[in-house]
Amino acid sequence: MAPRAAHANIQRVDDATTRAALRLFPYGLYAVTVRHEGEEHASTASWVTQASFHPPMVAVVIENTSKTIGMVRDAHHFAISILHEGQREIAEKLGRPSSATSQKLKGIKTKPAPASGVPVLADALGWVECRVVATLPGGDHTLVLGEVVEAGIERDGAKPLTLEQAGFTYSG
């Protein structure tokens, strides 16, 4: 029996159904921070996951049109702070376009991460500081693979903020 092409029996689903199915995935809300040439920047992300135990790695997916992706590529380091349930306003602020909010970290308590000095949110649940290992373009976003070089826990007992709890449908 001859093998059939893998895509021969796949039918295209309508966009509304695809969006509805993808929204069933549970997502947390995270602050992606970067520092390059003296400038600090942050954005909210929801497409974040652990990618490896040894060495420890995470993956974050960042919108191609964002200021964040260019800075992450140039800086070769970034951090991800895990937001807690009480940080919805921070998630909203960092999720705004840079053109509308140029100094996104203004008024948010941060501290420099140990290895690269990239800012991390001092009141988040915790954070990971990463060295960029690879980037992979994927449609309208870019996947960034980062090796965790430092990590910290800032708050015990609080629960992570999720996309659903915040009332968001997307944050990337």
Image (cartoon, rainbow, N blue to C red):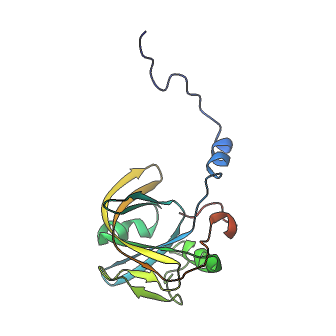
Task: Examine the image and state in which quarter residue 56 appears.
Answer: bottom left
Q: Position of residue 159 (x, y in %)?
A: 61, 74
Task: Examine the image and state in which quarter residue 134 appears.
Answer: bottom left
> Is 133 positioned to the left or the right of 66 in the image?
left
- 96 and 88: which is toward the camera: 88
> Is 75 positioned to the left or the right of 104 in the image?
left
Q: Where is residue 9 in the image (x, y as percent from the top left)?
A: 55, 23
- 44 and 162: which is toward the camera: 162
Q: Position of residue 52 (x, y in %)?
A: 37, 57
Q: Residue at the location (63% across, 35% down)?
A: 13
- For this orientation, the residue located farthest to the front is 157
- 143 and 2: which is toward the camera: 2
Q: Is residue 135 above or below residue 21?
A: below
* Count of numbered circles in the view: 0
Q: Residue at the location (49% across, 26% down)?
A: 7
Residue 83 visible? The answer is: yes
Residue 64 visible? The answer is: no
- 110 and 93: which is toward the camera: 110
> Is 84 positioned to the left or the right of 34 in the image?
right
Q: Where is residue 99 in the image (x, y as percent from the top left)?
A: 51, 75
- For this orientation, the residue located farthest to the top is 1
Q: In this view, does 97 lie above or below 123?
A: above
Task: Examine the image and state in which quarter residue 72 appears.
Answer: bottom left
Q: Residue at the location (59% across, 79% down)?
A: 157
